[in-house]
Amino acid sequence: MQLLSDRILSMSTSATLAMAAKARELRGEGKDIIGLSLGEPDFNTPDFIKEAAIQAINDNYNSYTPVDGYADLKDAIITKFERDNGLTYTPSQIVVSTGAKQALFNIAGVMLNDGDEVILPCPYWVSYSDIVKLFGGLPVEVKTSIDTDFKMTADQLEAAITANTKMMWFSSPCNPSGSVYSKEELQALVDVLAKHPDIYVVSDEIYEHINYGKGHTSIASFDAMYDRTITVNGVSKAFAMTGWRIGYIGAPEKIARACNKLQGQATSGANCIAQRAVITACTESPDKVKYMIDEFKDRRDLILGLLNDIEGFKCNVPDGAFYVFPNVTHFFGKTLKGKKINNASDFSLFLLEEALVATVTGEAFGNPDCIRISYAASTEQIIEAVKRIKEAVS
């Protein structure tokens, strides 16, 4: 009898985590690896949030939490949705989870049956496809390119819809491309979806505050989509709280209750101290973390300037998140330092081994022409990393 399940054997390992593990392994061998693979801010969690956590410890918050989150945290999330997104939710529509990734697992677990199709505009976050497949869904990839800022058009969406389409999952600002859908671009997608009222949308907005001027629009704010959208968010990125592991959704009540039911059989409620801290994060103005956003913008401009000086790197200008997603097909078919580069995975591995810079292949995100480079690193590291890359490919 087979020891491991077909389910786990067919699942891919997270490419971002695999590259981070490889980088740690090489560091353990004494190599000076610059890590630009993980989507993790290099800032410390702001003091006003840490103080709230310390206060929660002193107030003896140490018991199991409600499965869907503390009532006052849900109230703070409701306030945040109203303030930042123009969305009105009730407490029964909010579910707090152990990170936004668990929220996505919950959604797939309560909504997908075998054979249900889920449209994924490419590139998409690395785990979408495997989460969908884990629960019997069929990912339907819609290819985009650097020439359209990696955004799906209304015509592409219409062409991807079939009788089996159950959902569409997307992120804006996008991981890995940094692309931000404008209100007008979302309206065009909404016009298509309005003709297909049984299709639900997962809108991953974890990077909403890391936005460089285009502004953020939630697709749930369109009247036609409010009852058909599950908005996923959290505090990991904008508040530099990756390890605190708190994400949340705003959703139609029936879906939220189902997610609560599933989570009750999995992890139950999220960490008590982290939840108390997130009340403060959601309640305070986003302006309190603007210093991080300003720094990320400066780093974006820096890394684009440096990469555009390397022959073979083709970059667009991302409007959000903290990634660049250059097209590197120029190097495919070439031999660099004795190594044949057949695809983005080869190129990413080449950069790790020869330039000692960790990136992630675009194949993991549904786009085999590109690599993802995170600029959530210091200015000094960015400059040194791109210098090494340039030397390696020259």
Image: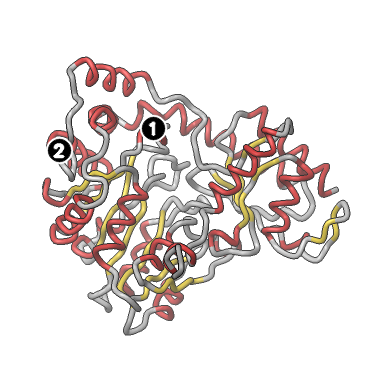
Which image quarter: residue 146? Answer: bottom right
Q: How far is the residue under mark 1 from the one under mark 2?
A: 19 Å
Q: Residue furthest front?
A: 1
Q: Earlier in the sequence, mark 1 or mark 2?
A: 2
Q: Element at badge 2?
A: helix
Q: On screen, 47 above or below 236?
A: above
Report which residue position mark 1 lands on: 239
Q: On screen, 235 above or below 95?
A: above
Q: Residue furthest bottom?
A: 163
Closer to us: 347 or 287: 347
Q: On screen, 19 above or below 382?
A: below
Report which residue position mark 2 lands on: 75
Mark 2 closeness class: few <14, some 14–19, many ≥20 residues within 10 Å: some
Direction from residue 378 to residue 168 in the image, left or right: left
Q: Residue furthest top?
A: 58
Which residue is at a point 68% across and 34% down the rendered structure image? 27
Q: On screen, 314 above or below 118?
A: above
Residue 16 screen position, x and y as percent: 55, 49
Residue 9 screen position, x and y as percent: 49, 64
Residue 88 screen position, x and y as percent: 16, 49
